[in-house]
Amino acid sequence: MENYFSNVPTWVSLLFIPTFPITIYFVSQIIKRGAIDAELPQKQVNNIQLGIWGFFTIYLTYTFLLSITGFLSENTLPPRVLLFTAIPLLIFLFGFIFNKPLYLKILDKIPLASLIRIHIFRFVGIFFLISAYYKVLPAQFALLAGIGDILTAIGAIFISKWVIEKKSWSGKAALIWNIFGFWDIVSVIISAIVTTKNSLENSTQSVIEITKIPFVWIPAFAPAVIIFLHISIFMKLKRER
């Protein structure tokens, strides 16, 4: 079982663990505010929040169990962590949530700045850089993933501020930032697949480290949620025009 825990120092893992409950909290608060502004009944607002926490608690527990058994740590193509966690979550978000009229009703009431500002959680990308420092992830993959996320998070601070201040060019800036952030997460997924392919063919270092506890929550949670958030921002920009 020990082999399925990250090889980084314990303090790094302990620092990382709270990032996901905090992120889910802020996402749920944004949705709650949008639901209240959409004038939904308080009982429905409470049910939405309970549903968010309940779903992600079950989902992250499911991911934890897959990881702790070693099932996700097999170096396969496509990576199992994508096949059994990220892709099903993506299908759920776009196949179920995205097609609900309630989604658009709440989206219309969520301020654009709030949707952008939530991406500050992508400072979590610093853990890719830490992993590269401790040589548990390939440097090229970790640098691409870490620097892209950090730049997106920094951009989210400034873009959301400009949107709130209603700068004349804030809409275009938000669109450019959103394209960059969307491409960043797509490029990380592609890089993970390419790195896995190279490791299988040439016995080079793989990305298996991010399938270990606690970092397995990054590939299981982040790609699908980030893509959904970026598509929501594209939708918001289009509807506001």
Image (cartoon, grey):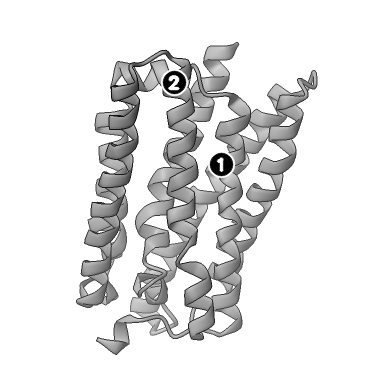
Question: Which quarter of the image is occupied by the C terminus?
Answer: top right
Q: Is residue 59 left or right of residue 17?
A: left
Residue at the image position 48 percent from the left and 53 percent from the top: 22
- Outermost front residue: 42
Marked residue nearer the N-terminal end (1 or 2): 2
Q: Quadrant of residue 133?
A: bottom right
- Please name whichever residue, 92 or 184, is drawn nearer the observer in this view of the structure: 92
* Front one among 148 and 232: 232
Where residue 160 sits in the image (x, y, percent)? 68, 34
Q: Quadrant of residue 204?
A: bottom left
Mark 2: amino acid: Ile
Badge 1: residue crowd in 10 Å (few <14, some 14–19, many ≥20): some
Q: Position of residue 86 (x, y in %)?
A: 32, 52
Look at 38% across and 62% down and name the residue there.
217
- Mark 1 and mark 2: span between their CA atoms? 18 Å
Question: x, y (%) of residue 88?
Answer: 24, 47
Q: Which residue is mark 2?
A: 36
Looking at the rendering, in which quadrant would you find the N terminus? Answer: bottom left
Q: Nearer the viewer, residue 141 or 39?
A: 39
Mark 1 falls on what kind of element? helix
Q: Which residue is mark 1?
A: 118
- Eyeballing the image, is 127 above or below 175? below
Tell me if label 1 and label 2 are in contact, CB under 8 Å: no
In this rendering, would 93 be left or right of 137?
left
Residue 46 in sight in this render: yes
Q: Secondary structure at mark 2?
A: helix
